[in-house]
Image (spheres, coloured by chain):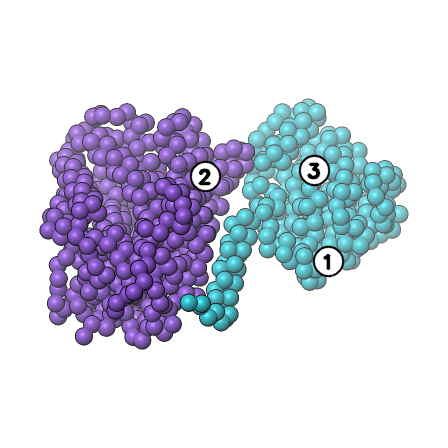
Amino acid sequence: MSETVQHLNFFQDTGGKKGIWAWITSTDHKRIGLLYFYSLTAFFLIGVLLGILMRLELMNPGKDIVEPQTYNSLFTLHGVIMIFLFVIPGIPAVFGNIALPLLLGARDVAFPKLNLLSWYLYILGALMALSTLLFGNAPDTGWTFYAPYSVRTGTNVTIAVLAAFILGFSSILTGLNFIVTIHRMRAPGMTWFRMPLFAWALYATAWIQLLATPVVGITLLMIAVERMLGIGLFDPSLGGDPILYQHLFWIYSHPAVYIMILPGMGVISEVIPVFARRRIFGYKAIAYSSLAIAFIGYFVWGHHMFTSGMSGPARVIFSLLTFLVAVPSAIKVFNWVATLYGGSIDLKPPLLYALGFIFLFLIGGLTGLVNGALAADVHIHDTYFVVGHFHYVMFGGTGFAFFAALHYWFPKIYGKMYDIKQATRAFWVLFVGFNILYFPMLVVGMMGMPRRYYDYLPQFHIPNLISTIGSWIVVTGLIYMIMVLIQGYRKGAPAGRNPWGGLTLDWQTDSPPITENFVEIPQVTEGPYEYK
Amino acid sequence: MNFRILLSILMVGVFSASGQTFDPKKFSSDGPVGIYEHLDEILPNDIWLVNQDSTLVNLKSLITKPTVVSFVYYNCPGLCSPLLDGLAEVISRSDLELGKDYQVITISFNPSDTPTLGKKKKHNYLKQIKKPVDTASWIWLTGDSVNITKATQTFGFRYLHQGKDYVHAAAIMVVSPHGKITRYLHGTYFLPFDLKMAIVEASQEKSGPTISKVLKFCFSYDAEGKKYVFNITKVTGALVLGAALLLFLILWLKPKQKLNT
């Protein structure tokens, strides 16, 4: 296909604006996606820094570097920043924004201005959350803001809670945008079942964002109201009910776990067929399992509360439902592995990260079942086993999927290729470091070490020491990975339209894509993974 | 919360006024004084009392519409006057009409009170109501000790004779048109809204107006706080689900627009 007219790519087309204005007033979905990417990365690095400080404190028993109160603020802000500023918006806000319209063959998302607004809300909420670090006493409640402590503590909880509320709005708007985009803006010929699986995953995610986020919004607002006006909602001494808080919080926050992981699974479903050169195994099963996870995910929140006061039958039902939600997740894993079987596998960094995802998510998912089993949970509740489990799911799962997406779409976004060999090495450093960092947590949790203390008994020393050393390796891997990507951005060779040989529509346009993505909207005649 | 504090202070006041020391045992569940809710109990047919015009009446057959019942005695130095004041005030402030939407029955549990005294009291309290009402719909009853015991036991209203006076608690009870006890509102001060909700509940056997059904969905009785509370979780949940369903239906049913190239 030869072109006579030169179209400007989205970096070159500034819309007649200068410098930063060309970015922060742009409604181009790719520019907004990159705005998200840069801001998310900044917050992620702050979160990493806080995590490193925690690991340093836990290197030896007793006080190492920070006071107990400081440690309480560290784990609160590490949680708030990582969950609300990185993992929840993560893949949808960055790669959803950039890739969804490309994958659908659309010129933009359905509501470009709303898209920009949601970024501003995100930044507003993020700045409010970070301001608690700098002014007054940083919140010390943990990212869950459990009442009644969050109502009584003298720290800056109100601002942190309002920040999470505003971030929730950003999430709702993004979800709404994606739902309408997927319903309305698919290219001609792209039926629901010719849609790339990443779009299916984003679709399921968007409904959770839309339906579950208002719950936490109202709940957090209720905390703010209780703190400022003294109305008894959750604090028993004011006539409130702390268990009600936990229910409301987890009615959002458990589905939110699927907001975090579903888009990651979508990314993996894109990457694997491209690098195995095979049609994905069980397309419909993967698509429907996304919807099933989103649906069942609404009814399992009680498994966070097995030890906090719930009737026996309720606990049994929540436990059973928790086991059920593992079924669609396992369906996906089996389908990915079946896709790889017999394929001509090309071990490029995106696939490595995808395989890393499968391995780590498997550990995270199976330890999740241990938590979901009633009797086991009573033993390991609030121990480091839980901390290990959710880091395997969120960092090993969503985090690695994020890196997979980054390495997969990097040449599309910037039009240049990073050094494949170096990126592969960075992956191995990160992968090894990850397991050294988090696997000891599972062990030490089984031994009975409780979470959220700045100190521990001497018998837990060795695993904690190993874990802290692992954290240094992880940071080394992260820095290495970022350096390789920056180097690729600055000096990489031109990547061309389709460096990986993908069949989805995103690879059929220029790299970087032109403004409005396609010269002519493509006609779709078959499914997205028809490798022959 | 404030209600109960107020009530406790009032009751402590009553005890000290009648020379009693405050005894927490009186408030325990098996104590002789207090109001033990007999919700869903149907009034018996055999309670015969005398109204302020000295006519013998059957309590159950008096009740043909939602009815607010209160127990007092006429020479009461403590709690009864605040209770009746509160009742008169809520009748004035409520947008429900006494006589049309509901009626009020005040029963003396002192067997030596007379209908004549009841008539005088009725006259006094009607004067406190600051809007035109159907005066026949606030009925003042007296009775002999057998019938009074039957009535107070039906409502779970327990009191103690102390010299000239009685130790007792304060509440109004709402009875449905079929004689079923549907709600207790405790204390001596009542919000018009709480009264309205209680009356709506009592009359629901008779299919209330739509607006009341909406009210019923959005507000429920908080047994701890002894008042109706706004169900923020239920209401916002319903709104969010409704909005999401609407969005889905619009996207699903409205045909896709042709995209301009």
Looking at the picture, how far across and down is residue A365, in whole percent?
24, 55
Q: Given contact means CB atoms under 8 Å apart, are the residues at marks 3 and 2 in contact?
A: no
Kind of element beneath mark 1: loop
Q: Label 3 marks which chain's residue?
A: B
Question: What residue is disc 1 on?
Answer: B177
Above or below, A328 relative to A136: below
Please indicate whether residue B44 sits to the left or right of residue A259 in the image.
right
- Residue toward you, B175 or A173: A173
Q: Label 1 marks which chain's residue?
A: B
Q: Residue at x 41, y 65 (%)?
A: A185
Mark 1 closeness class: few <14, some 14–19, many ≥20 residues within 10 Å = many
Q: Which mark is residue A162?
A: 2
Can marks 1 and 2 be said to lie on one chain? no
- Which chain wears purple? A
Q: Residue at x 12, y 48 (%)?
A: A422
- Which chain wears cyan? B
Q: Quadrant of the N terminus of chain A?
A: bottom left
Q: Label 2 marks which chain's residue?
A: A
